[in-house]
Amino acid sequence: MFAIVWIGYAFAALARQVLLYDPMFIWPQALMQTTLFETFRKQDVSSPLARRQMKVFFFCLIGMTLWQFMPEYVFPFTSSLAFLCWVAPHNAVANFIGSGIGGMGFLNLSLDWSNINWNGSSILLTPWWTQVVLFLAFVFNCWVLIPAAKWGNLGSYKFGLMSNSLLTVNGTTYPTTDVLTSDYKLNQTAYEEYGPMYMGLQNVWATFFDYAKVTAAVTWILTFGFTQIRTNFTKLVRSRRKGAQTSQTAGQSINHQYHDRLNVIQRTYKEIPLWWFVALFMAGFIALVVIIACGYLWIPIWTLFVALASSAALVVPFGFLYAISNYQLAVGSFNELVYGYMIETPAGNGHHHPCGPSVYGSIAGDAWYRAQYMLQDQKIGHYMHIPPRTVFFSQVFGTILGIPVNYAVIRWVLSTKGDYLSGKKTDPLGQWSGQSIKSSNTLGVQYAVLGPSRLFKEAEMKPLPWAFLVGAVLPPMLYVAHRTLPRWLRIDLWNVTIFFSGLSVFYGNLSTGYTSAFIGGYVVMYWAYRYRFEVWKRYSYMVAAAFDAGFNLNMLLIFLCFGSGKAISMPNWWGNNADSVERCFSLD
């Protein structure tokens, strides 16, 4: 954990000069944190506005903390308000259409903040155009593709439509352990006995869009973002040359090329030396090499170099997208696919352990995430006039404290929620469903044991490689349309990368919260931003911080009061029905 985090922090050096100082890249999450910190600071100097903001903050924090006991523990019915199930609780079709826990989520609302923040970031921070794109992805996925697959002719395999598991030809869970040898290779005899591995159709098209979004991210940056990136690189080169002419060995920071107030202030601070990032990278790299060489991570050591190279290549395009949209793009199954092809080569023979793709994906994917968090915290320091070197050391120190805590939380989740994650019990709220774990297991078996070559021979899987072409072609086509059609169409906001990602991250059957998020986003990020801007400017980020803090505090209180030691379950009643908290009693 330390190694991957430190490597990711080191990768931030690849993009910080391009994505950090340019005022165009606002980093909405960093703005929220800055607003909160600045309000705390201004309260010390008796600012009337700061006092009002703090009252709003604590009111919202306490309110969210108390409210979340309702959907999370006392009144789970409020976590998914399935109106169609109220009208026809025993109608299977109405239940599937209206249910948000196992169905399409049509006309379904949620009052649970964890469901409303379904896109991984607060609806009070994410730009309205991003929320629109993500909601359209949800609509296309749940209200178009899923009914077409269930009742239409979209695909021939009809079992496990919204399942993340591998299935047999008759729809039962595939016995993956039975087709593995003792050294985790494919038992061909057993495989022929059980037959091919199938995926639910929703999982198939999620994989398709998961592939498409990677190439779409690259071509979108090369078209819509090329001018800005080129300008920033030009400014960086110019600042380095100017610094060399004035006998500064490292040259000037790029903030000398910007003349806004924040950059002028930051010029007085010393930049972070490049060798600090190099040292951090080497510490993590050496640790990973040693661990892999000792055989603890199940992957060939040479694949580590490919993982790090691919992760480094994505820092700028993915960071660009996150800095303007507040949407964190996950690489997803693309990394596992690459790993699957690599171990099919002679150099990768003997490394078919099903955990291998997950390890490779964690290294290649999480390094980018850590780079993003480093950049985001550096942006907070930029907003608050904190020396970059101070922020750097704070982040490194934070990993020393935070990683052991994270590991302890993981152990707690496994000990208290393990039965839900393993499938022995079913979480009535659908939140501890283990969908991500099931998806990782599916990817491991598909790409390491079965292998991409054999996988793509199946009829349902043959179209998947075409996703890379679709993702690569669509952004240039939209760019041409943007340059030729009227600008009021705002085609530059039709971000297919985010659209594809919204389709790919919806795996499993939890469809509640999307409509509530869209309504809330409209009120805050569209209506209030345009017609009550002064109120929005003063309180939006404060409320966002309060809601997130209140939700996290509530989770801690629920754990301490009802989860630590002997677990205390909420008794069943009308609002916590044992069969269905939504009261969808005929859901398949």
Image: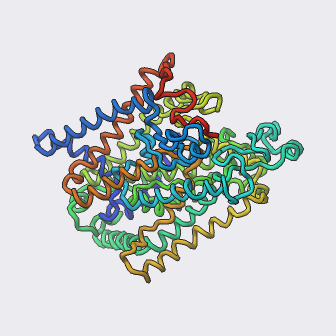
Does 420 appear above or below 325? Answer: above
| Residue 94 rendering spot, x and y as whole percentages | 57, 45
Outermost bottom residue: 484
Q: Which residue is at the front of the view, 379 or 220?
A: 220
Does 250 appear above or below 49? Answer: below
Residue drawn at x 47%, y 66% is 495
| Residue 420 rendering spot, x and y as whole percentages | 59, 30
Q: Which residue is at the front of the view, 283 or 95?
A: 95
Outermost front residue: 87
Q: Which residue is at the front of the view, 362 or 295?
A: 362
Q: How many marks?
A: 0
**Is residue 305 at all visible to an observer of this figure?**
no
- Coloration of the structure image: rainbow
Residue drawn at x 42%, y 22% is 560
Q: Within the image, what quadrant is residue 131 found in? A: bottom left
**In the figure, is residue 484 to the left or right of 46?**
right
| Residue 156 rendering spot, x and y as whole percentages | 74, 56
Residue drawn at x 43%, y 33% is 71
Outermost top residue: 566
- Which quadrant of the figure contains the C terminus? top right
**Is residue 31 at all visible to an observer of this figure?**
yes
| Residue 154 rendering spot, x and y as whole percentages | 68, 59
Q: Which residue is at the front of the view, 116 or 76?
A: 76
Residue drawn at x 54%, y 59% is 140
**In the figure, is residue 558 to the left or right of 349?**
left
